[in-house]
Image (spheres, rainbow, N blue to C red):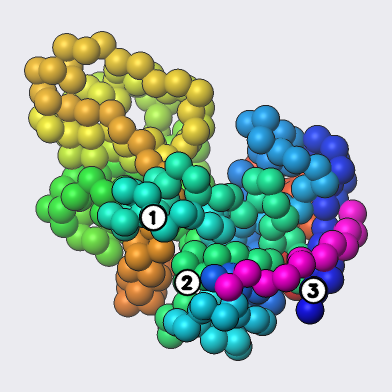
Amino acid sequence: MSETVHAWAATEARGELTPFEYELGDLGPDEIDIRISHCGICHSDLSMLDNAWELTEYPLVPGHEVVGTIAAVGEQVSHLAPGQRVGLGWYSRSCLTCRECLRGDHNLCADAEGVIVGRHGGFADLVRAQSTWATPLPDGIDPAAAGPLFCGGITVFNPIVQTGTAPTDRVAVVGIGGLGHLALQFLRAWGCEVTAFSHSPEKEAEARSMGAHHFVATHDEAGLERLAGSFDLILVTVNVPLNWPLYVNALRPKGRLHLVGAAPEVSSPVFPLLSGQRSISGSPLGSPATTLDMLEFCARHAIAPMIETFALAEVNAAMEHLRAGKPRYRIVLEA
């Protein structure tokens, strides 16, 4: 029997979100329905609302940091059960048969489906997804704050795993916002020596409380120059242009400049890369297995996003709060 979903949708770019209903249709054999209790708001929701990436189809129901309980499971789903609490992030489906999926890199599947790309997301009471992408919440994870882990959290946890970051490494995090404040917590618990880079000097005390051993104001380029050869990994969480050669120069030999923020472009002279065997890389979110590892790591080390909470009916106010750059540091909607 088809379920009616009660959601909030926009019908045009930058439009107001208004009540919207749609039918889910028949549940597929490998799918689940999630009854949503909380949904984080990510800057990607704003990008989709504004059609900044030219991917958006309207009406758009944003929301891809979903936490809730399973309402129904398809006939082929045996590892999840109704009533189980799960989370869902950017991806809602992958093919499961391509080379990347078979290697466990489901997030690199060429046919991966986004929760809010060409379909409706989590600013609603129900959302549907392939069961592979629904991750059970371990004990010790607060469901009310867990939503941002499924996008912001896995976005910064995945590169720690993918780059082989060691507990002895010296790591810098550029940008102490929705992504960066989680990266500081992960890297400190990982055992790294952690430096926070921010254009906001007033964030120093808070950055240190979240795990940074050191703090650097990024407007001080002379100070950055003195850090030449300092870091094994520089994790860039911002989406703005930087003085890229200066950051490459701050890497140790074999160091890596890794981007998870969607900066418009990055460039560097080749010689510093060749002479020091340095590299520049980037990554999307993470696989289902890495997401589960992240959640267990969070539970073990009491890592959680710092959130502000709005009721789902206040979604437009919450989106404007995000557009104004005011959250400290993530927003969660409560159903």
> What is the crowding at mark 2: few (fewer than 14 residues within 10 Å), some, or many (at least 20)?
many
> What is the crowding at mark 1: few (fewer than 14 residues within 10 Å), some, or many (at least 20)?
few
Q: Secondary structure at mark 1?
A: loop
Q: Would residue 17 be found to the left or right of residue 70 on screen?
A: right
Q: Which residues are magenta?
A: 18-29
Which residue position is annotated with label 1?
97
- The C terminus is located in which quarter? bottom right
Q: Position of residue 288 (x, y in %)?
A: 41, 63
The mark lying in front, picked from 1 and 2, is 1
Whether 304 is drawn above or below 325: the answer is below
Residue 224 placement: quadrant: top left
Whether 171 is drawn above or below 148: the answer is above
Q: Is residue 143 magenta?
A: no
Q: Earlier in the sequence, mark 1 or mark 2?
A: 1
Q: Position of residue 90 (x, y in %)?
A: 55, 53
Q: Earlier in the sequence, mark 1 or mark 3?
A: 3
In the image, what residue occupies the spot 69% across and 57% down? 121
Q: Which mark is residue 2?
A: 3
In the image, what residue occupies the spot 42% across and 51% down? 107
Dot 1 and dot 2 residues touching (CB under 8 Å): no
Whether 209 is drawn above or below 231: the answer is below
